[in-house]
Every structure is written in structure tokens, then in C-alpha cells.
Image: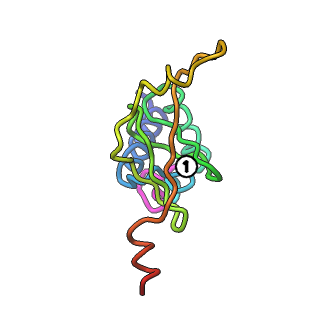
Amino acid sequence: MTKNDKRRTNQKNAIREALFRLDNHPTASMVAEELSGDVHKASRATVFRVLADAADEGRISRLQLLGEDIRYDYKTEPHYHLHCVRCGRIWDSPLPYDLALNSAASGNGFFVQNHLIEFRGVCAECRDKEDH
């Protein structure tokens, strides 16, 4: 393994660890910012490329919500999301993924492969700020 290969591996590991650490379905920019002070810091271009490649390979999920930049999720199994319209945070929904919706929505020659559901609202923290 060359020094350059080791650097790439360290950067990939640092990017993956930042994705887990943030745990908020971050954008590539958020991950790059998280790594800005890290010893294994990577350029923004590297972060964008590594995350996009990992999503293309199915190792992480790419999430495109209404009006948002692409976000990334280390959970690859299908699930729904809660999106606070005030602070922008995103959480996994406790509602279980309903595979039956795919066949229920199929028709007129259209075959549904998967579906995404985004629940938009206001999180508890933002509601508490409103009350004070």
C-alpha cells in the first residue's frame, strides 16, 4: 500500500466516522465542516466524491428531501423521515416502512420499485423555543 493509498483510506474512514458522529442525515458540506479540524481532513471535493461513491455502491443512502441539498444516511434499509421545517434537522421516523405501498401504488403499467415519505413539521426543541 502506498502512502497515497493510506491517505485515501484514512480520509474515507474519517468521512464515514463523521457521518456516524453527526447522526443527523448531513449534507456533504456538513461532513466537510465536521472534518475541517480533523487530522485526516479531506477537501470538500473529496468528501463529496467519497459520499457519492458510497451511495452509488449502496454502502450509505442518499436522501433528497423537498427544498434540501442531498443528505446522506448510514442506514441503508428503507425507512421514513421526520423533517423539522424550522431548524432543518432530520430524524428517522418510528413508523415502520410499508412495503405493501409499492404494489398498492403500482398500476397502469407502472411498477413501483420503492417510495420515500417525508413527514414535515416542528420538532419539540423548536416548539419549546416558541413557547418561551
Q: Position of residue 22 (x, y in %)?
A: 40, 55
Side (left or right) of 130 relative to 96: right
What is the quadrant of the C terminus in the image?
bottom left
Secondary structure mostly taken by the magenta-highlighted segment of the chain: loop
Instruction: Give the residue displayed 46% in from the left and 49% down from the top.
Output: 25
What residue is drawn where x is 44% and y is 35%?
60
Q: Which residue is mark 1?
A: 28
Please report the residue visible at 66 percent of the width from the left and 15 percent of the height from the top: 108
Q: Residue 61: image x %, image y %?
A: 47, 36
Mark 1 lies on a secondary structure that is: helix
Residue visible at 55% across and 62% down? 85
Count of numbered tags? 1
Range of magenta residues: 34-42
Q: Is residue 29 magenta?
A: no
- Measured from the top left, where is residue 33 in percent x and y? 51, 59
Residue 39 falls inside the magenta stretch: yes
Q: Residue furthest top?
A: 109
Residue 97, quarter of the rendered image: top left
